Amino acid sequence: MKKRLLTAALILTLLSACGTSTTDENTAMNEETSSEQTNSTATNTEQVDNENSDASTEPVISATLSEAEDIPIQEYNTSLWGSLTEHQDEMNGRVYEENGLFYMKPLTRVNTAFDSTTGEYTWEHDFRPGTIVNPNFNVDDQLIYLTTREITGLQKSDGKQMFSIDIPEYELMSDLHLTNNYYVIAQQPKGADAKDYKLYAYDRQTNKLAHEQELSLNTTVVLYQFASHGDLLYYVDNDNILTAIDLASGEQVWTQQVPQLRLVHPLVREDHVYVFDYDHTIYSFDATTGEQQLELETEGSTIGVNIANPIVTDNRAYILSEEEAFYLLSYDTETGQERWRLDTSGYHVFGMYLMGGTLFALADDLEEESDDPMTYIIKVDPESGEIQEKIKLEQKISKGPRSSREAVLTYVDNDRIYMKYKYNMYYISKDI
């Protein structure tokens, strides 16, 4: 009996041991499986994160210009656009429209007002001998011109001369620049060395010379040299020094050494001054103090006088790239990250403006891409990069990628974008 009890106890002990061993084994197997699953999940999560990280660095193509539908401009209300096409005279300088009158200067020294309803010139003003130097300005009731001999203001109602400022003789001369209170020009005096210029500031109230000073400028880009903010004037000298001058006193307010620049003249947006170097980097400075605020590397490559200038705001930048591919790029200036890119392959973008919450791009078919090259106005959502509308004009308004500054002339006046090329001009409202 005792033997039987001992045998039964031994069997129970062995069974218990086997059960415990099996349970431990199962637990270990479950833990190992769980660990593998956890590791697998972590690996998958890491792979997803890496994929998302890689995806976040990939450029986002917001839209493709060639795929957008063409909308003829004739489908829009004529209160939002106008044109003067196949005009009898080739137009020189800027042309402005007001109430059916087009203020222009044909390729002569005569300035005119052309009535589109009658097809006749309403008045003419014959300048003293000399060529009009672009650009001219539309200021209140006057048109302001710079000729080879004077700065002249004409009354728009009848073309009568309101004032005339004689300018010194020169070898080379910049464009006329208007600030709040001054007319500004730079000249290379006769007999001066190649880089030596003089800056002249004329008071807009008295038409008298306020002051002059010597400058060292790059002669190859002097026409595109200046920008202003209030009565502060900005330029980059021959030693790549960005300089701010107070036109009221003629004194330097601040200077900043900048790299070799691709676009030599500075741009002013809001309270910032921007310059662009050969590595496609954007630098910004406080317009008043000169303190550097931004250094943004971009892929923008076609910064120059015959294409669309970059647009930079407090937190966004819009740049063109036309090297291996053709893109309009948007960047976040705070993070330096590319936000979107619009594929413009097959088109030459020659103008770009931000008005009324819309980014307007002016583009032509490239000659080799189209049998009938035409100009388009592309309305882009500046936040998403999506094309809102692609408006087709009736004429081509630029010469193309190799055009000069005189061949492509676009400008903004009174919430309108103007486009002019030879015998044709268009204007569109920001509300189109």
Image: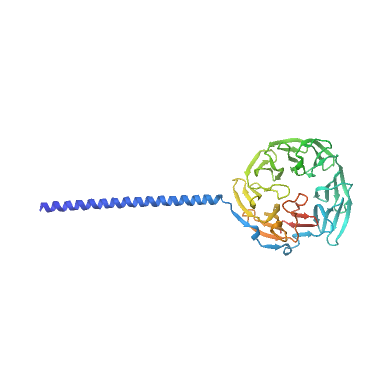
Q: Viewer-proximal residue, 111 or 367?
A: 367
Q: Is residue 220 in view?
A: yes
Q: Examine the rendered structure and indicate whether residue 136 appears above or below residue 115.
A: above
Q: Position of residue 29 (x, y in %)?
A: 33, 52
Q: Quadrant of residue 203?
A: top right
Q: Viewer-proximal residue, 172 or 136?
A: 172
Q: Viewer-proximal residue, 171 or 71?
A: 171
Q: Position of residue 354 (x, y in %)?
A: 69, 52
Q: Position of residue 229 (x, y in %)?
A: 73, 43
Q: Does residue 119 appear left or right of residue 255 in this picture?
A: right
Residue ID at (83%, 53%): 104
Q: Examine the rendered structure and indicate whether residue 430 appears above or below residue 173.
A: below
Query: What residue occupies the far left of the structure in this picture?
Result: 1
* Image quarter of the C terminus: bottom right
Q: Quadrant of residue 241?
A: top right
Residue ID at (63%, 42%): 295
Q: Is residue 365 in view?
A: no
Q: Position of residue 87 (x, y in %)?
A: 82, 59
Q: Quadrant of residue 291?
A: top right
Residue ID at (52%, 49%): 53
Query: What residue occupies the far front of the structure in this picture?
Result: 368
Query: What residue occupies the far bottom of the structure in this picture?
Result: 75
The colour scheme of the drawn protein is rainbow
> How many marks on residues?
0
